[in-house]
Image: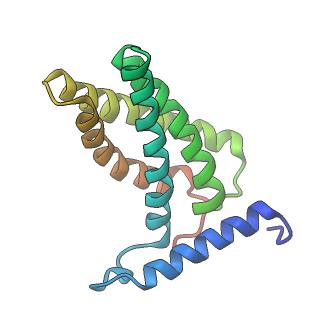
């Protein structure tokens, strides 16, 4: 680590904030929730809002097809999620090339299974597309955290 590097120090500050927040969780949750789970929730909550905003602008605002709007919003949000989680949440120092390839495979599986499968499937069944996307988002959150913690960023020491 290079302590003088601003990115490293911001990542350390983010992790310290997540640790401090987890310590204050009620009902014994502090023993069950790792700081990386909270950090993942914060980062991916933000990127999910980016995803929904793009979905709304592209589909409702510009009239793009739903599948294309979902795809573009998803691609932008998950690119942002990778960068933010790598730097701030998991603070990985593994070579980016192979790690990014692994991430892309995880994301493709996620996209086909949860986003298009569940999200578009629910919309096709008549569920309003924002609600369908939120339901798919709940499923993908569990999958993506597990994949990022134990597959993509496996070089990082556990919380």
Q: Nearer the viewer, residue 85 or 108?
A: 85
Work out whether 85 lies above or below 122: below
Q: Nearer the viewer, residue 53 or 69?
A: 53
Number of marks in the rendered image: 0
Work out whether 42 lies above or below 104: below
Instruction: Quadrant for residue 23, please give it.
Output: bottom left
Q: Position of residue 88 (x, y in %)?
A: 63, 61
Q: Residue at x 44, y 66 (%)?
A: 38
Q: Residue at x 47, y 60 (%)?
A: 42
Q: Left of 144 or right of it: where is 78?
A: right
Q: Residue at x 62, y 40 (%)?
A: 100
Q: Residue at x 54, y 46 (%)?
A: 81
Query: Looking at the image, can residue 90 be seen?
Result: no
Quarter of the N terminus within the rendering: bottom right
**Residue extending furthest toward the left:** 125
Q: Nearer the viewer, residue 119 or 96?
A: 119
Work out whether 11 lies above or below 132: below
Q: Position of residue 6 (x, y in %)?
A: 80, 63
Q: Position of residue 119 (x, y in %)?
A: 27, 31
């Amino acid at each position: 680590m290079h302590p003088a590097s601003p990115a490293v120090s911001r990542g350390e500050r983010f992790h310290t904030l997540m640790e401090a927040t987890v310590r204050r969780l009620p009902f014994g949750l502090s023993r069950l929730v790792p700081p990386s789970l909270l950090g993942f929730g914060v980062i991916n909550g933000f990127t999910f809002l980016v995803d929904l905003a793009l979905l709304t602008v592209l589909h409702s605002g510009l009239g793009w097809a739903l599948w294309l709007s979902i795809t573009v919003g998803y691609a932008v949000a998950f690119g942002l999620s990778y960068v933010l989680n790598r730097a701030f949440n998991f603070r990985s120092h593994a070579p980016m090339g192979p790690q990014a390839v692994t991430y892309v495979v995880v994301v493709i599986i996620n996209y086909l299974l949860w986003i298009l499968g569940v999200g578009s499937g629910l919309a096709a069944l008549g569920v309003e597309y924002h609600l369908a996307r939120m339901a798919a988002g709940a499923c993908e959150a569990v999958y993506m955290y597990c994949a990022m913690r134990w597959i993509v960023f496996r070089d990082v020491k556990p919380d």
